[in-house]
Image (cartoon, helix red, strand yellow):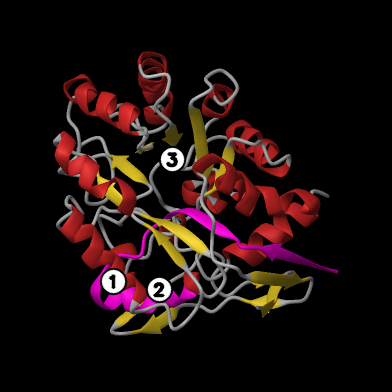
Amino acid sequence: MEITLRAPLDMHLHLRDAEMMQLVTPLTTETFSGAVIMPNLVPPVTSLEMLQAYKQRIMANTEGHAFDPYMVLFFKDYTEAELAAAKDHMIGMKLYPAGATTNSEAGVAQIDSVEHVFKMMEEMEIPLMVHGETHGFVMDRESEFLSIYEHIATKFPKLKITMEHITTAKAVSLLDRYENLRATVTLQHLIITLDDVAGGLLNPHLFCKPIAKRPEDREALLDAALRAHPKLMFGSDSAPHPISKKECCGCAAGVFTAPLAVARLAQLFDQHGALENLQDFISENAQRQYGVKPAEKMVTVTKTPFEIPQAYEGHGHRVVPMHAGETLDWKVTSIT
């Protein structure tokens, strides 16, 4: 059994920078036609010049694979002139609540203080991407943020808003209530719950933000993905960290899935008898929602064993992937 996917897209990806970028970039560009690149570097990508320079560094590390990096500005209080200059060079802007996740200290402290920027984005048709969490109790942070999504969606009805890496059944329900809301969902949140992270011995390589939630949340996410809800897109949130930052006190948040994402999604959809919907989930929905035309790439995934390495090494880094050391039922066998 096999399936050939046309132009797979990852609509939420961390490539980091410097040596780490050199290690992980080819692991995405080999199997994906394009990806939305997160801007929370140190320092964050906050100008057109920084965005263009980062794109050049990414393209220098694709190892010749056909790939389109969809660049994103880190949200801040930009002027109209700054947004106009950057508009044609980016797919949108990413809003981080200050301190909500990795390298987000320069994010937004008060949403109502930046509504004038939302207005400019609405008028200029620049999409808004949001890490939607409050600073409340960790299991409730996404749910508490949903009212903010509703407020922005209502007040700025022509502003296209992406709820990034949703993790709750309540977030899924918003997709059908507001025309201008859409969402990405990760591989890990379709598979794991908090029990997998901390129900037995702590598994730091499954710890991410937003944290995995309850079984009923996973089931709602999985149901929407398997039926390829037209406003739900695959966004891996693949977030590499060195082992020294994961297997330690103060473990960094992030699950590294880039090398296995396509094969693991094929296995997941096959297990649930929904393989025919994978093309929409991993590409067509994103093309419709964002109007992108990705690089031509055909990726064939075959039902044959694929042993995931214990770690990916190079350029002075060693990164542990999700399912390290396990054998999947599906494997990428051809890329043209």
Amino acid at pointer 1? Gln
Question: Disc 2 versus disc 1: distance between alpha carbons?
Answer: 16 Å
In this view, 66 is above or below 295? below
Residue 17 highlighted magenta (yes or no) = yes
Residue at the disc numbered 1: 56
Mark 3, secondary structure of its residue: loop
Question: Disc 1 versus disc 3: distance between alpha carbons?
Answer: 25 Å
Q: Earlier in the sequence, mark 2 or mark 1?
A: 2
Residue toward you, 266 or 230? 230
Span of residues in magenta: 1-27
Image location of residue 275, percent across then percent down: 78, 54
Query: In this orientation, does residue 316 appear?
Result: yes
Residue toward you, 312 or 88? 88
Mark 2, secondary structure of its residue: helix
Mark 1, secondary structure of its residue: helix
Amino acid at pointer 3? Glu
* Foreground label between 1 and 3: 1
Q: Is residue 205 left or right of residue 106?
A: right
Residue 154 highlighted magenta (yes or no) = no
Question: Disc 3 versus disc 2: distance between alpha carbons?
Answer: 21 Å
Image location of residue 220, percent across then percent down: 64, 33
Image location of residue 111, percent across then percent down: 23, 24
Q: Residue at x 20, y 54 (%)?
A: 48
Q: Residue at x 53, y 22 (%)?
A: 179
Query: In this orientation, does residue 167 appear?
Result: no
Residue 164: assigned label: 3
